[in-house]
Image (cartoon, helix red, strand yellow):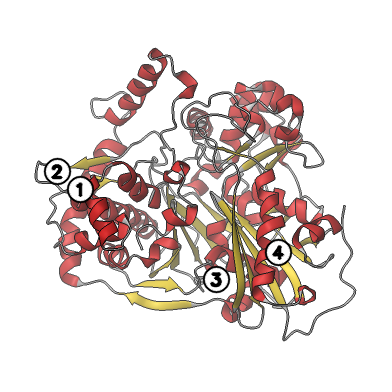
């Protein structure tokens, strides 16, 4: 069902837009004034089913156990965000709903929904209610690694030209690896899948009744380069049954970022309390949509969206082949520039895991006595140290490595522990490890001839002053920070303003509605030199364990994964084992707690 345009237009001075950010555990809505980006009201709604990692338990009904590395979601939870968070944000803003001219959304990616031709998720069909492959595969579903490995090997063997646009490796998180896994592990669900839809596009479909693919997720996650997907011949060589994957399930009209996907339907208007017919912007990725909100739209301004993981996005006037990047797409962030993406699979997750599992009771008691959470307490203790005082170096691969190794089978390492090592020592080493991981990414860009002149940070972790200073010192670059605490939602609202015609393009909307504090943290030369020495050790370990030839003596991290899998099967727990990537928040903490945990 589609909607006609609104019959009346509000006074431009009063016009507002709504941005909805779909995160890992919740959806956030914000009401924003189009003239200056003022955030007038916001609301958060947690997903009722959170992330399904151990078993497919939906609505209190026990379901089958899930194998390691699975991460599923329930699409109904996304609609509930529209029904709950949007009206709540509108009420909090105090504005008249008639003044809303557009709505924009962003989503975690790559998050995939298998649907019928009309957009109905397969998990909503009774016959597939207990089939894991019928549910949403969240971005952090990493169980398609072997399928990604096959895609990479075949592409390299055939000399596929698109492979270099993704740093030489396709991720297990992306559309084709997850699609191949679906085909080979549940052919019946694959056959029933008439549309293989990015959640970013599925939620727009629910809002406006039109299925339009967005240029961002299509370019980065669906291997769409120079107007083409991988060829039918390539797909058939992977598996004969995969030959029609693009033509039958993927191909759909693609729209530029900031374009109008359609008008809000009557049904979606009833869900949200917004006027029928207002502009619905095409979808976007949470990190990429944040760049305009942080005014990080110029060449060389790398935006690091730091929360569960970190996504690094940057625009440039240069096309380069950066090893291990997640992709480079023409207009992938803003029109007229090449948009680059890289990232780290675990950042806030790593800090949350350590605090949740590895800190003794006396620390918690002291933190409680002082009215602090454990992250703040450990940060205080760690901040009192000199660089290198703990004698440790860590690899931040507890959720695998996204860039530049693109290997989710890698795991975390801490070197240098003694009987004198305290929790704050390890905690600081983990903070530093994530900064070292970012420096590896920055250096990969520089070595490929794509300069990085500034780091701009968004996300809950920017509140941790120690962490931010560590990043400035380690990378030897000034650190700017976004002003908004709702960066992705504000970015989605900025795109809604463009779709509604309130601003001529994303650049103009970012200038009017985005906010950033420049060079809040600058590198200290003495600390930077000390970190150079630690970073050299990090790089040695990074290359030793991360680049070890498969099957070689040094390939210990992959062997340990195999040992674990064998032990789990031998114990008879098989698919019931917890995922290696089980997130901190599945223990009951709210998403915002983890993202802001080191504040």
Upstream in sequence: badge 2 or badge 3: 3
Upstream in sequence: badge 2 or badge 1: 1
Image check: 521 left or right of 241? left
Q: Residue at x 38, y 57 (%)?
A: 597
Q: Mark 2: few, some, or many residues within 10 Å (few <14, many ≥20)? A: few
Residue 478 position in % (x across, y down): 33, 72
Residue 545 position in % (x across, y down): 27, 36
Q: For residue 104, say whether it is visible.
A: no
Q: Which mark is residue 293?
A: 3
Q: Residue at x 24, y 38 (%)?
A: 544
Upstream in sequence: badge 4 or badge 3: 4
- Give SS at disc 4: helix
Residue placed under numbered mark 2 in the picture: 416
Tag 2 and tag 1, C-beta contact below 8 Å: yes
Q: Mark 1: few, some, or many residues within 10 Å (few <14, many ≥20)? A: many
Upstream in sequence: badge 3 or badge 1: 3
Q: CA distance from mark 2 to mark 3?
A: 41 Å
Residue 530 position in % (x across, y down): 15, 62
Picture quadrant where residue 269 is located: bottom right
Q: For residue 345, say whether it is visible.
A: yes
Q: Residue at x 44, y 38 (%)?
A: 582
Residue placed under numbered mark 4 in the picture: 87
Q: CA distance from mark 4 to mark 3?
A: 23 Å
Question: Nearer the viewer's eye, disc 4 or disc 3?
Answer: 4
Q: Which mark is residue 393?
A: 1
Question: Nearer the viewer's eye, disc 4 or disc 2?
Answer: 4
Upstream in sequence: badge 4 or badge 2: 4
């Amino acid at each position: 069902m589609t909607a006609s345009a609104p019959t009346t237009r509000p006074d431009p001075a009063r016009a507002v837009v709504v941005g909805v950010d779909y995160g890992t555990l919740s959806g956030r809505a914000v009401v924003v004034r189009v003239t200056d980006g003022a955030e007038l009201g916001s609301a958060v709604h947690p997903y009722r089913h959170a992330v399904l990692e151990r078993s497919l338990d939906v609505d209190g009904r026990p379901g089958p156990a899930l194998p390691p590395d699975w991460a599923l979601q329930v699409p109904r939870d996304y609609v509930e965000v529209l029904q709950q968070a949007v009206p709540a944000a509108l009420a909090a803003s105090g504005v008249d709903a008639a003044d809303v001219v557009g709505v924009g959304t962003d989503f975690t990616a790559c998050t995939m929904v298998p649907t019928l031709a009309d957009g109905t998720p397969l998990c909503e069909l009774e016959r597939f209610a207990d089939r894991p492959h019928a549910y949403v595969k969240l971005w952090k579903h990493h169980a398609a690694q072997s399928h990604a490995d096959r895609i990479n090997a075949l592409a390299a063997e055939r000399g596929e030209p698109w492979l270099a646009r993704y740093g030489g490796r396709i991720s297990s998180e992306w559309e084709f690896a997850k699609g191949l896994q679906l085909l080979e592990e549940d052919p019946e669900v694959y056959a029933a899948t008439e549309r293989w839809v990015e959640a970013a596009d599925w939620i727009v479909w629910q809002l406006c009744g039109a299925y339009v693919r967005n240029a961002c997720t299509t370019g980065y996650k669906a291997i769409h380069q120079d107007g083409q997907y991988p060829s039918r011949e390539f797909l058939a060589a992977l598996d004969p049954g995969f030959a029609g994957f693009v033509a039958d399930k993927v191909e759909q009209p693609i729209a530029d970022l900031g374009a109008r996907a359609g008008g809000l339907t009557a049904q979606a208007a009833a869900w949200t309390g917004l006027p029928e017919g207002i502009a619905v912007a095409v979808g976007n990725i949470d990190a990429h949509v944040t760049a305009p909100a942080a005014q990080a739209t110029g060449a060389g301004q790398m935006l690091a969206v730091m929360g569960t993981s970190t996504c690094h996005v940057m625009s440039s006037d240069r096309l380069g082949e950066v090893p291990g990047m997640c992709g480079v797409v023409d207009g992938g962030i803003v029109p007229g520039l090449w948009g680059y993406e890289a990232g780290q699979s675990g950042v806030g997750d790593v800090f949350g895991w350590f605090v949740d599992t590895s800190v003794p009771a006396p620390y918690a008691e002291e933190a409680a006595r002082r009215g602090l959470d454990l992250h703040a307490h450990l940060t205080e203790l760690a901040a009192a140290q000199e660089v290198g005082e703990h004698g440790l170096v860590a690899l931040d691969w507890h959720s695998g490595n996204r860039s530049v190794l693109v290997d989710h089978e890698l795991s975390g390492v801490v070197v240098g522990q003694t009987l004198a090592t305290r929790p704050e020592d390890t905690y600081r080493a983990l903070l530093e490890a994530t900064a070292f991981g970012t420096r590896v990414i920055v250096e990969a860009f520089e070595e490929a001839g794509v300069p990085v002149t500034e780091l701009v940070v968004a996300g809950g972790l920017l509140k941790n002053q120690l962490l931010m200073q560590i990043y400035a010192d380690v990378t030897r670059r000034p650190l700017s920070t976004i002003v908004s605490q709702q960066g992705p939602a504000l970015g989605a609202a900025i795109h809604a303003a463009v779709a509604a015609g309130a601003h001529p393009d994303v650049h103009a909307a970012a200038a009017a509605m985005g906010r950033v504090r420049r060079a809040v943290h600058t590198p200290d030369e003495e600390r930077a030199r000390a970190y150079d020495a630690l970073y050299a050790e990090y790089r040695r370990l990074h290359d030793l364990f991360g680049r070890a030839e498969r099957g070689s003596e040094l390939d210990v991290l992959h062997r340990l994964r195999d040992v674990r899998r064998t032990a789990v099967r031998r114990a008879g727990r098989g698919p019931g084992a917890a995922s290696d990537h089980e997130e901190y928040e599945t223990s009951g903490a709210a998403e915002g707690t983890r993202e802001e945990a080191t504040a």
